[in-house]
């Protein structure tokens, strides 16, 4: 299954480097809020109050008029104030990031723990790093496949026999180096097939939560 650009963006913001600014903290923040059932001010969150509300966007229409979007929010009671001179209403707090995290977290709660782990790998730091490389983000899942584990064990054994020091590269980098051999090792395609199967299963589960 191919996820929509919006799904990819939201998963990367939840699990991975947020906009290139480092590791995202949205997931842990929301997990803590969900566990405590309270907002940042210590008020109890009534999860039954997740409703459709209007939120004014930072962007403006071409004529300068406020642009309003309808979003699902567990915080419909956020205070709203008006600008001096009768301007448009604006939320006092900018909670777009928390709403995104809440939306992703609610959907993740509907998939299995294994699917969540796969999605976290694909759209977290490792997946975002490999997305820019030859194999794509699916390579982040390859070290967990049986053919890849056997390839690493074989390489470890060869290093011992040859008196070489243990490999210092991370498993995914080691496997990419081994996969670059010519002719291509047989384990590569088998491992990729298994990793792609995991990806399709997890992304399919995610897609069914929409």
Image (cartoon, helix red, strand yellow):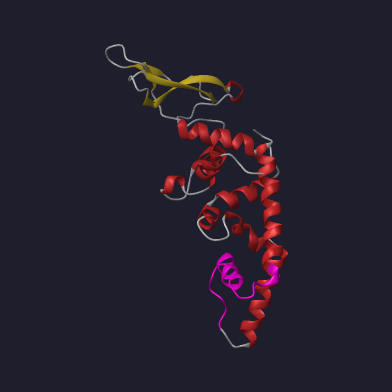
* Membership of 171 in magenta stretch: yes
- Whether residue 102 can be seen here: yes
Q: What residue is shown at x 31% (from left), y 11% (from top)?
A: 86
Residue 204 x %, y %: 69, 42
Quadrant for residue 51, please give it.
top right
* Membership of 24 in magenta stretch: no
Q: Is residue 23 above or below residue 156?
A: above
Q: What residue is shown at x 50% (from left), y 26% (from top)?
A: 43
Quadrant for residue 88, please give it.
top left
Residue extending farthest to the top is 86
Image side of residue 109 versus residue 91, left or right: right
Q: What residue is shown at x 43% (from left), y 45% (from top)?
A: 19
Q: What residue is shown at x 58% (from left), y 71% (from top)?
A: 180
Residue 169 x %, y %: 53, 71
Quadrant for residue 74, please give it.
top right
Image side of residue 144 versus residue 79, left or right: right
Residue in front for this viewpoint, 146 or 41: 146
């Amino acid at each position: 299954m191919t996820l929509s650009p919006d799904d990819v963006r939201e998963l990367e913001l939840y699990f991975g480097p947020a906009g290139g600014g480092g590791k995202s903290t949205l997931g842990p923040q929301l997990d803590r809020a969900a566990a405590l059932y309270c907002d940042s001010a210590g008020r109890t969150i009534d999860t039954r109050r997740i409703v459709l509300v209007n939120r004014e966007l930072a962007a403006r229409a071409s004529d300068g008029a406020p642009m309003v979007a309808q979003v699902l929010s567990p915080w419909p009671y956020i205070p709203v104030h008006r600008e001096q001179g009768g301007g448009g209403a604006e939320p006092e707090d900018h909670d777009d990031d928390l709403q995104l995290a809440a939306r992703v977290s609610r959907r993740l709660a509907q998939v299995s723990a294994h699917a969540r782990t796969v999605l976290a790998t694909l759209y977290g730091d490792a997946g975002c790093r490999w997305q820019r490389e030859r194999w794509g983000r699916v390579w982040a899942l390859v070290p967990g496949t049986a053919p890849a584990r056997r390839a690493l064990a074989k390489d470890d054994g060869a290093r011992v026999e040859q008196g070489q020091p243990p490999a210092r590269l991370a498993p995914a980098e080691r496997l990419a180096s081994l996969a670059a051999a010519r002719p291509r090792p047989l384990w590569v395609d088998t491992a990729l097939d298994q990793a792609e199967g995991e990806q399709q299963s997890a992304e399919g589960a995610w897609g069914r939560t929409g």
